[in-house]
Image (tube, helix red, strand yellow):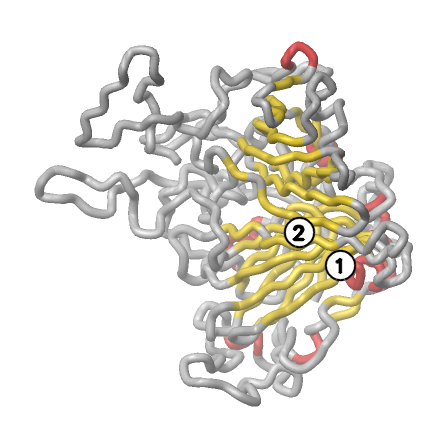
Amino acid sequence: MLAIAGSAFGRLSTVQPNATFSNGNNPTTTNNDDSCEITVAPAATLLLPVFDVNITAAAGASDTTLFTITNVSAAPQIAHITVWTDWSFPVLDFNVFLTGYDVQSINLFDVIARGQVAPGGPGTSSTNLSISPQAPVQSVAGAIPGDNDSNPNIPAANVGPGGACSGSNLPGTLPPELVAAVQTALTTGLYNIAGTTVGCGTTRIGGTHTNARGYVTIDVANNCSINLPNNPAYFATEILFDNVLIGDYQQVNGDTTVGNFAQGNPMVHIRAIPEGGPAGSNPGTNLPYTFYDRYTTPGVLSRRFDRRVPLPSTFAARWIEGGTGSFNTNYKIWREGVTVGTATSSCSGAASNSAMPIAQVIRFDEREDSFALTGNVICSPICGPDVPRLPEASITSTANTSLYPSHAASTDISGWMYLNLNNQPPLNLNYTSPAGYVPTRASQNWVIVSMFAQGRYSVDFDAAHLGNGCSAAAVAPTPEVGPAGGIFVCPPFTVCVNPPGTFAYDGTNVTP
């Protein structure tokens, strides 16, 4: 199954403690499993922050991004996959049916260059029993997948004969005219499907780059539909809330002239809190903001209807440049856009996500020297024209001094950077925080550190986030670099004394 492109959604309630104690020592945690922290754990949404695919090279001869989705539950699940441009405009979606304990790998070269989605084979991507048998050849007690119609949140008609997920509907081959439109959208930013009225004319909805570049979201859903996250019906009737998916990606360059680089990392696992319930259910959530609340239409749905944990805005990211191994570092960065891209209007909104300002960047070397851009350029509350900017999805070198401070005055070849990537909340919503939360809502971001050297060594790993998606927006310029909430916390019912000349106990463990 497959589809095309769009935008709009989000909303929430207040935090309640999960227990009280007779001695009055109430817990510092909230309801069981309530957390704004991002961990690698079964999730309802997976985010591939950025992909980079050479669609003109031969298969396996250059850059491609692969990702794998795993269903860790015994029940079947539907993974709804959306491909977005680097300006946050959805240009393609398709579905993968996962039997219980199923694993499905997707090579984005196959999808974008060849128009092939999850080619069929034993045990993958179909409700057809000859492809995905209900009983595996070998199994042990406690590890037997359920029937393909055993998920109570997926109507049996959707996976039965003639249903949206049935038979030949999965897997699929994309129409040539759609493949051509997706290719141009992800390389030139122009998006028009030949022979249809779908498209944006000469209005660009993505950046210009040699490789196809963007990001991917993967949601648990109850149907194999072609609705996009910019359609209110997607959240109202299709998206589910079961934390059952895990995923990882690999970035591979098969060009032997540059050394056959390869990196891999878990995708971003975004849990639903509280989890569970059928599509359309709305029990509320203690999260003050959510991952998709840019798309939940106020007045139509509760703004935090999706219940997905929001992402942070401040990070600590390692860098290394040079040395005997000629090391290099790229940052792969995803950022929350400020507008919702849609092909139902002028498509002009996507351009607002093309160059979003960065609040503050400070580079540290190994001797604790610190460096900022000229004049310590910052962005708060209004950004000037000289502020460094990045689109929603990007891959940039730490040696790029138009984005990251130069360390020419240092003899060190490595260190770390403080990245405050906060831009501003989406433009189409008036954010009000629940009681107990600081009202300033930061934009969401994610950073992957990608290091490589000598055409042989390479590695990807997540940058450390200094706060979480519920933390208040960090001040820029910061009065002191450090974790959100500060350091030297004095916990409840504890006496803390700081001698003269030492840091005060003025931190908080409220959030995070």
As rendered, which of 37 and 354 lies closer to the eye? Answer: 37
Identify the residue at horizontal 62%, vertical 73% (top origin).
165
Report the amino acid beneath label 2.
Val
Q: At 68% across and 41% down in the image, what residue appears?
A: 332
Left or right: residue 218 versus residue 488 is right
For mark 2, give the secondary structure.
strand
**Residue corresponding to mark 2:** 216
Residue 178 screen position, x and y as percent: 82, 58
The CA distance from mark 2 to mark 1 is: 10 Å
Residue drawn at point x = 70 percent, y = 53 percent? 263
Which quadrant would the C terminus be assigned to in this image? top left
Q: Secondary structure at mark 1?
A: helix
Q: Residue furthest bottom?
A: 137
Q: Hey, which quadrant is residue 176 in on the image?
A: bottom right
Above or below residue 343? Residue 169 is below
Mark 1 sits on what residue? 108
What's under tag 1, amino acid-wise? Leu
Label 1 environment density (alpha carbons within 10 Å; few <14, some 14–19, many ≥20): many
Q: Earlier in the sequence, mark 2 or mark 1?
A: 1
Between 383 and 93, which is closer to the camera in this rendering?
383
User: Would you say residue 478 is visible in this rendering?
Assistant: yes
* Left or right relative to 68: residue 185: right
Residue that appears at 12% across and 38% down: 24
Q: Nearer the viewer, residue 286 or 389?
A: 389
If the image is split into quadrants, where does the N terminus sit? Answer: bottom right
Q: Position of residue 23 (x, y in %)?
A: 9, 40
**Which image quarter: residue 402?**
top right
Foreground: 379 or 377? 377
Residue 87 visible, this angle: no
At label 2, counting other C-alpha atoms closer than 10 Å, the crowd grade (few under 14, some 14-19, many 20 or more) is many
At which x and y percent is residue 194? 88, 54
Tags 2 and 1 in contact by the CB under 8 Å rule?
yes
